[in-house]
Amino acid sequence: MFTRPLRSSRTSRIAAASAVVLVGLSASFAPAAWAEDLELDSGHIDAFNVTAEGGNLKLNLKEDVTGSHVLHDPDSVTLRVKEEAWTDKTAQVPEVGTSGYYLPQTQDPNLIWPGWDTNGVRSGGFGEVDINFVKVSGPGQVYAFQTGSFGGNTPILADKGFEVRSGETIVQQEPAHVHTNWVFTAPGTYTMCVQAAADGATSNVARYVWSVGNGGPNTVASCDGEGEAIAVSARSGNDDKESRPSSSSSSRSTSSATTSSKPTSSKPAPAASPAKRQSLPETGPSYMTASFLVLGVGLAVFGAGTVRLVKAATRNK
C-alpha cells in the first residue's frame, strides 16, 4: 500500500540531486567577481590578465588564491615576495649574475606564482598581444626568463634581454597562459606600469606593486611620474606583512625609487618581423580541461538520474 509513495519520494530525491548538480555547474561557469584590496604572498596569479570586450582591451589581475579566477584592479593588490625566496642560485645564470629573490617558473606552493594570460582576447578577434612595461622602478633590477624542458634559459622579452626595464615588451604571439622565472635583486618595493596592445588597440595602464623581502625602500611610484608612500610595519619574520593604505589615507611624496630603464646610449631593438617574434608556449595549468571534466561528471550524474526517473515512472504505471 505504501510502495508508490516511497517510489515517489525516492524519485523526488533523485530529481533534487540532479538539480543541485546543474546549479553547481552553472555556478562554476559564472563570471568571476571583483575583490577588495589584499596582499598575496602565495598561490597562482595571472598578473597580466588581458581580455577584450567590444573591441577594447582590458588589463587586470586574476588569481586563484581567494577563489577561482577572481579578478582585481592590479592597483588594489600587493604582490608579496617573501624573504625565503632569496637564493644564491640565480648568480649562476650568466644574464643575471647575482643573488636575488627568485620566483620559479614552476610553482612553489610557498611563494606567489605570477604569470600572464591572454586567452581572453580571443572573443574580441585578437591574436598577438604585446605586454608593454611602460615604467619599471625599484631598489634593484628585475629579471624574467624561461627555462626549457631540457635546461637552458631563454629570454621572454622582444629585445632578447633578461632584464625587465622601462620600455621592454613581452610579445605573446598567440593567446596563451604562461609562467616564467622572476628575479628581484634587492629588497624593497617595486612598481611596474604595464599596458597591453594588440592590432592597434591599447588597454588601460595598470600599476603593479611588488613588496620584496624584508626592509628596503618602500615607495610606490606613480604611473604619471609621482610617488606614493606606503606604510610598512616592522617585521621580524617572514609571516609579518606590509600594508598599503587606501587612496584616501595615503600620503603623496616624491618617489625615491630608482627607475630601471634602457640606457639612452644603447642600440634600440630593431622592429622584429613576424617570423622572428617569439611565441611563448603555455606553461600554466589548463582550466578548460578541469571545466570540461566537471561538466562531463555533472552530465553523467544528471543522465543517470533521468534514467532512474523514467524507470520509476514506468514502474508506477
Image: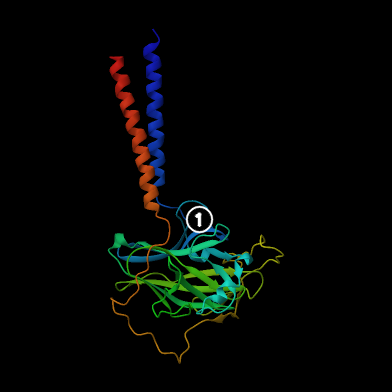
Apparent side of residue 309 relative to residue 86 in the rendered image (left or right): left
Residue in front for this viewpoint, 52 or 99:
99
For image coordinates 49% across by 51% down, the residue present is 67
Residue 247 in percent (x, y) is at 56, 67
Q: Quadrant of residue 219?
A: bottom right
For the question of whether residue 112 can be seen, the reply is yes
Task: State the image coordinates of residue 128 (x, y, percent, origin top left).
Answer: 32, 69
Helix, strand or loop at disc 1? loop
Q: Is residue 98 left or right of residue 72?
A: right
Q: Which residue is mark 1?
A: 35
Where is residue 159 drawn, in percent x and y? Answer: 40, 80
Furthest residue to the bottom? Answer: 265
Looking at the rendered structure, the kind of residue marked 1 is: Ala
Report x, y in % for residue 114. Answer: 49, 64
Looking at the image, the residue that sits furthest to the front is 150
Quarter of the figure with residue 218: bottom right
> Neighbour class for label 1 at 10 Å: few (<14), some, many (≥20)?
some
Q: Quadrant of the N terminus?
A: top left
Q: Residue furthest top?
A: 1
Q: Is residue 169 above or below residue 74?
A: below
* Colour pattern: rainbow
Q: In the rendered image of this protein, does residue 84 appear above or below residue 268? A: above
Q: Nearer the viewer, residue 203 or 316?
A: 316
Query: Is residue 113 placed above or below 295 in the rendered structure?
Result: below
Residue 30 in view here: no
Task: State the residue at coordinates (41%, 70%).
Answer: 204
- Quadrant in which residue 120 is drawn: bottom left
Marks counted in the figure total 1
Task: Give the residue displayed 33% in from the left and 75% down from the top.
Answer: 277
* Quadrant including the C terminus: top left
Which one is in front, 272 or 216? 272
